[in-house]
Image (cartoon, coloured by chain):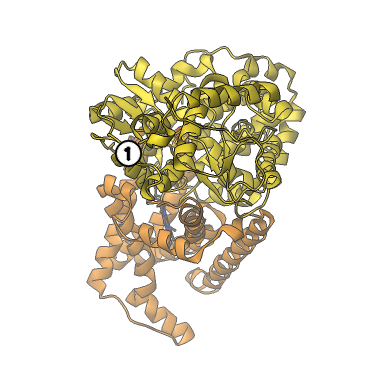
Amino acid sequence: MAEPAKEIVVDPGLDETIKKLTSEKIEKTINKVLTKGAAARLKVYMQTCVHCGLCSEACHFYLSHDKDPRFSPVGKVKQTLWEIVKRKGRVDGEFIKNCSRIAHTECNVCRRCSMYCPFGIDMAYLLLLVRRICALLGVVPQYLQDTVNSHAVTMNQMWVKQDEWIDTLQWQEEDAQDEVKNARIPLDKEGAEIMYSVIGPEPKFLAQLLGNISMIMTVAGMDWTMPSFDGWDNSNMPMYSGDFENMARVERKHFEAAFKLKVKKIVMGECGHAFRGAVYDGPKWLAWKEPPVPLIHAVQFYYELIRDGKIKIARKFEQPVTIQEPCNIVRGRGLGDMLRYIMRAACEDFRDVYPRYEHNYCCAAGGGVINCGPPWKKSRVEGNRVKAEQLKATGAEIVVTPCHNCHSGIEDIINYHKLGMHVKFFSEILVDVMEIPDELKAE
Amino acid sequence: MYEFVSGPLVWISFIVFIGGSLYRLVSMHKLAKKEKVIYPYMSLKYGLRSIIHWVIPFASTNMRRRPLMTVATFAFHICLVLTPVFLLSHNVLWRQSWKISWWTLPEGTADVMTVIVILAAFFFLARRLVLPEVRFVTFASDYVLLAIALAPFLTGFLAYHQWLPYKTILILHILSGELMLIAIPFTRLSHMLYFVFTRAYMGSEFGAVRNSKDW
Ligand code: HEM
Ligand code: SF4
Ligand code: SF4
Ligand code: SF4
């Protein structure tokens, strides 16, 4: 079969790092990964897969590339892991670079394919193993590695310093007070009911979301707090590069912040991968069956607020809207119905998508793919033509994306495929439509 | 020759099949215990829920998307497992050697079921050759495995109808059946052993952890 005839993407994270690899190092690393820790599932999956190709149509990359078999889930595993196992780890740097391209930039580890395989083989897990090998060899797309470095050094994704973090919160608190009297962002309040955590890019690029939550919490009368110290960032890029040691440090820190503040539960902002890290990958690596502190995603939180009448809708949002169902909270946590509940509660004209619920397509940004940065953007947006077609078919003008990666990813898809739509977080709609009681209205 | 393949070799292949399968399952269990998260995640309820959705024809989304494949694979597997167990002439052999016997299939039905296995195997072969996504992930061993599964049925069919030299075909039939048994624990045909476990694991993850469906 011909080698991929793809555009060459220049990425020093791959091109330069492979120059330092020796064949002994590659072989040793691979054997370590494949025999330690990963043995049971890897072995059974390898012996069970009957090479039937039935998982192919699960993958948006495959569908968007006119069914090019190199992009099918099993096709990606074949080009990487099968070859590695067959050659007993005796592969060269160029091969590892290809592995990183496939595993880091052409798979979102969205796990849609495991619903299509008759054996339930977890291809996303196998491709994460490939990422693990690449990461241990230092071969990771440069932009992604930079966020990992930031996590390792600062415990947040964006090199945000503590004073910047606190400044941003205070500035957003003031902004929120323009709309809601007494809006607060209580810092380090011990014994509060809720700790609210967000991802690093929020204070950096989307600070108004922090103002939004301040308004929502104040109107709903919640007893909440945010940590001023490390652990406030719930995002986790090492989880996606394959640097699981740092993934575990980040997850621990997040939970430790909750312990330190003695809160009853954590509410996480609108992000899919962060939620997955806290609820699934993190605990799994740390050999915990469940997160040590109860923890819910913003969608569930908004659902509870609206259902219990803590937030009332004054007038519904009028433009036609649809949703991007983030895999990590819908396929990964079953929040599809709650998402529809809040959408219908807040919007006049909600247009559902098809396929939907756990069968919805991934946005192609998740799994760290968007974090691989500008060099890989074209391949990412071209790899999700089916998403563009799916959104277009709804006829909506606004796409609500309760996930940061989806948000940026869908925006890129809309622009590239000229859909003329706009993207919003749910909180942006909610602050627009919620009823602010008279006594809380700012003059 | 006939005495050997129909005597000691049958014993050997059953011992290898059963012993090998047990060995496979025990080593899977040992490895799975080392991966600390596997057993704690397993849930009987969600494991069964998943298995049930994947052993009933058209109960999963992907099966509904590919009706022809679904019909072929269910027909293939059902006939492949049931025909040899409930075949009259096999039952005669059980009775002769072990004095046990059970319900048998009418001969005509068994003949049809054999033909179904053969046709389905050719359907799998055609799929492998024609569909790019299957061809891309096909190894030579996939054809060999298909041949191993097909051979006992093809030779059994020929032997029953006595279209070719009966004695030779019969010996080939017995040999290929033995080969298939021996191959199950040591090749990807071991998907037969692992199916319930991989399904139960994914079903448990989807049900108990991710709160959603895996079909
Ligand atoms: C009894 C338990 C078994 C189960 C649950 C099972 C299940 C499956 C499944 C889910 C597939 C995937 C593709 C498809 O749907 O066709 C498959 C394929 C296959 N099975 Fe089985 N199987 C079993 C036993 C066997 C046995 C005993 C054999 C033969 C010795 C066999 C031979 C095959 C072959 C050759 C394929 C590949 C078809 C292809 O080439 O695409 N299976 N099986
Ligand atoms: S992108 Fe999703 S569907 Fe495609 S291979 Fe990766 S996990 Fe599977
Ligand atoms: S992963 Fe599953 S669906 Fe895909 S080729 Fe292997 S057995 Fe078939
Ligand atoms: S960004 Fe959103 S859709 Fe994409 S993988 Fe994450 S949760 Fe899934």
For disc 1, the marked residue is A313
Q: Position of residue B86 (x, y in %)?
A: 35, 74
The residue lying at 60 percent from left, 49 percent from top is A43
The residue lying at 27 percent from left, 59 percent from top is B115
View quadrant of ligand 1: bottom left
Total marks shown come to: 1
The residue lying at 55 percent from left, 30 percent from top is A103
Density class for disc 1 (Cα within 10 Å; few <14, some 14-19, many ≥20) is: some
Chain in orange colour: B
Q: Is residue A106 visible?
A: no
Q: Position of residue B155 (x, y in %)?
A: 36, 60
Chain in yellow colour: A
Q: Position of residue B48 (x, y in %)?
A: 44, 64
Q: Amino acid at mark 1?
A: Ile
Residue at the bottom extreme?
B99
Q: Is residue A206 left or right of residue B122?
A: right
